[in-house]
Image (cartoon, rainbow, N blue to C red):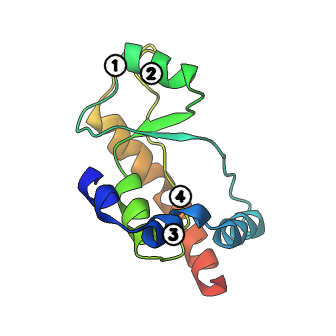
Amino acid sequence: MSGLLGIGTVELKNNFLNCPSERMNDIIKSAAMEKSIELQKGTYWYNKGPTYETPAEIRMISEFDGDAAGMSTVHEAVFASYLNMEVAIISCITNMASGIADKKLSHDEVTETANDVAEKFTLLLKTAIPKL
């Protein structure tokens, strides 16, 4: 991704000024309200991965006002913005960060949470997409 950011013109880099799209975010919020789906808003901290963040990294992210950390979403949003696509960002946070909860992190927890919210997440997308 760093190579991508380094090769663009000023015009292409300006494509990031509307990321995420306020219009698309408003549609997603409206769809969530329509279907009584609770959303949270926050600052997503991107890490390269593929690992869970350490307790020290979570403390650092918190110091920079990060609300959630992960390895996905950012690549796609950056590249789509670079291509001047209108971008909305929805992340499903699937586990508590290292050092926050008492239990050890596991991929099983991530999979279980993803399966638990799949129906609501799908409903949100199916409600929002036709409004775009």
Amino acid type, callout 1: Thr
> Where, quadrant-wise, is the C terminus in this rendering?
bottom right
Residue 15, disc: 3
User: Is the residue marked by circle 1 packed among few (<14), some (14-19), or many (20+) residues within 10 Å?
Assistant: few
Q: Label 4, label 2: how many angstroms apart (C-alpha)?
A: 21 Å
What is the spatial separation of the Cα atoms under label 1 and label 4, in whole angstroms? 24 Å
**Tag 1 near tag 2, CB within 8 Å:** yes
Q: Amino acid at mark 3?
A: Asn
Q: Earlier in the sequence, mark 3 or mark 4?
A: 3
**Which type of secondary structure does the marked residue at label 1 adopt?**
loop
CA distance separating discs 3 and 4: 19 Å
Residue under pointer 2: 58
Q: Amino acid at mark 2?
A: Ile
Q: Whole-Å distance between the Cαs marked 3 and 2?
A: 30 Å
Q: Which residue sits at x=57%, y=80%?
A: 129
Q: Calculate the distance from the C-alpha at mark 1 to the C-alpha at mark 3.
A: 33 Å
Q: Earlier in the sequence, mark 3 or mark 2?
A: 3
Q: Which quadrant of the view contains residue 79?
A: bottom left
User: Where residue 51 sits: x, y (%)?
Assistant: 25, 32
Location of mark 4 (residue)? 90
Identity of the residue furthest to the front in this view: 10
Answer yes or no: do the residues labelled 3 and 2 have beta carbons within 8 Å?
Answer: no
The residue mark sitting in front, 1 or 3, is 3
Characterize the local packing of mark 3: few (<14), some (14-19) or many (20 or more) Cα atoms within 10 angstroms. some
